Amino acid sequence: MLNGTIIVILISLAAGAAIRAWAFAIFAIVVALGFGIVAYQNSSLLGAALYGLGILVLMQVCYVTGVFVVGLWRRSRRPAKDSAIADPAPVPSKQQQS
């Protein structure tokens, strides 16, 4: 079970960098249901549902962490623009009108 959990964590972190949230949500539900069914094949339905829910929560947390870390990494790699701050506009001179 520990190996499966580690694999789920790594896949979720990698998915945070690669796929959209809606696609990951569908994937996570299918994987969590699969883990719940396989892990508690000869046990109660409630135990399988709780285990699947735990895996689902773990996957979602790892996905959000992956999205956050990749966003920070991409932002740190982006070169700073020299002209990021606009040059101030010239102040028009005040002329006295007669």
Image (cartoon, grey):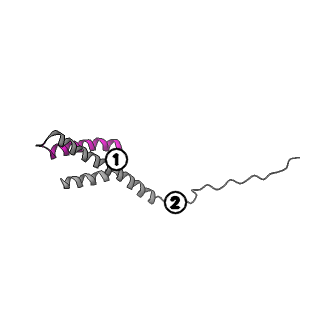
Identify the residue at image location x=27%, y=53%: 9
| Label 1 element class | loop
Most common secondary structure along the magenta stretch: helix
Left or right of 6? Residue 42 is left
Categorize mark 1 by other alpha carbons within 10 Å: few (<14), some (14-19), many (20+): few
For mark 1, what is the residue? Answer: 19
Q: Which residue lies furthest to the top in this view?
A: 45
Amino acid under disc 2:
Ala
Q: Residue furthest right?
A: 98
Q: Answer above or below: position of 72 versus 57.
A: below
Q: Answer above or below: position of 86 versus 48.
A: below
Answer whether labels 2 and 1 touch (C-beta < 8 Å): no
Q: How far apart are marks 2 and 1 (CA)?
A: 27 Å
For mark 2, what is the residue? Answer: 80
Q: In which quarter of the image is residue 46?
A: top left
Categorize mark 2 by other alpha carbons within 10 Å: few (<14), some (14-19), many (20+): few
Identify the residue at image location x=29%, y=41%: 26
Asked whether 93 or 58 is in front, the reply is 58
Left or right of 71? Residue 56 is left
Question: What's the magenta region?
Answer: 18-43
Q: Quadrant of residue 90?
A: bottom right
| Label 2 element class | loop
Position of residue 35 measured from the top left corner of the image (x, y, whole percent): 19, 46
